[in-house]
Image (cartoon, rainbow, N blue to C red):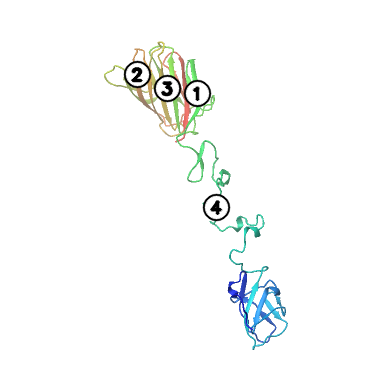
Amino acid sequence: MSYIGRDVDNISNVEKLDNITFDGSATYALEKSSVAYTPSGANNILISIDGVVQMGNFSVSTTNIVFDWSPTSSNTCDWILHYGTGLVNTLGDQVITSANMGANSVDSASYVDGSIDNEHLADDAVGVAELSATGTASSSTFLRGDNAWVAAGGAWTHIVTKTASSSALIDFVDGASGVVFDNTYNFYVVIGQSIVSANNNVELDMFSTNDGTNYETLYDYVEIRGLQGGSSPLILTSTTDFGHVGSFGNASGKCGAFVLNLPNPSTSGTYHTAFGTAVVNDDTGNLRTSMFGAQHETAEAYTGIKFAMTSGNIASGTFSLYGITT
């Protein structure tokens, strides 16, 4: 009698194996789609021969089925089914769930490259520690497009402020008193505020040094100075200083201020330049403003700068040095 029941192709977790052609032997190879098949065991196989379902009259050995009798060429194999769990070569769709999996049974070796996308990442799952960037992450660095942590360009870093008090000079020399004036930054700025002169009708001069002791006295210098009440700007030239502010008056309440810009002072083989702006209450009771620029006449690096009045002391005022990463 032929098999009566549900279509075997629709039974879940059932493998339909290739039919066998009998030749009088007791042992036959089991295959699925012409590929050797290893069953879980004899009890996981149903085979129909000449319309009769066989069970209990055969065993299995690796990929072979071994009958207790010898089917002949006159016998017909209707179908062979392998069912149940065990050594199942091919799993049915959606038969494995998270409940069937052990803890930590899937690790990074099990992932297909590129299989984890943004949708499957938890918020904040990737932090600084997971990045392979070079450099050091900190509050003063950012991650650049080439995967490097670098200092933010254009940021001003305050290096040191010096306060004058009847001072003969104010200087900033690399390595002295907390001063940095080297290739740490490629642009330096000095801001002078509320500067008061001890003497009347004097200039605040600026000089550079390459050894911290001896200061240059040979420059190319141009200044455009405007005078309150004056009819036209005054153009001054000098060869003895890097910049100057003046003329100072020393009456009560009179003071001056300036901004001095110093590009790349540590670069050798360059005729270094400086430029800036200044404002001062002068000795005649008028306001003076100026723009100035200077150039070294020697192509060399320099390591410091000083400020001093043409005569007398700097009575008071603050001088602040900043470094800028551009």
Q: CA distance from mark 2 to mark 1?
A: 25 Å
- The quadrant holding residue 100 is bottom right
Q: How many marks?
A: 4
Residue 281 occupies which quadrant of the picture? top left
Determine contact: label 2, label 1, CB under 8 Å: no
Q: Which residue is the site of mark 3?
A: 206
Q: Secondary structure at mark 3?
A: strand
Instruction: Check disc 2 and report the residue beneath it.
Output: 288
Q: Secondary structure at mark 1?
A: strand
Q: Which mark is residue 108?
A: none
- Residue toward you, 229 or 210: 229
Which residue type does callout 3 highlight?
A: Met
Q: Is residue 78 visible?
A: yes
Disc sitting over residue 120 in the figure: 4
Q: Is residue 126 above or below residue 30?
A: above
Q: Secondary structure at mark 4?
A: helix
What kind of residue is marked 4? Answer: His
Other-residue count near label 1 (Cα within 10 Å), few / some / many at <14 / 14–19 / ≥20: some
Q: CA distance from mark 1 to mark 3?
A: 17 Å
Label for residue 161? 1
Type of the residue with mark 2:
Arg
Q: Residues within 10 Å of mark 3 (few under 14, many from 20)?
A: many
Name the foreground residue: 267 vs 253.
253
Q: Nearer the viewer's eye, disc 4 or disc 1?
A: 4
Name the mark nearer the viewer: 3 or 2.
2
Up-down: is 11 above or below 226? below
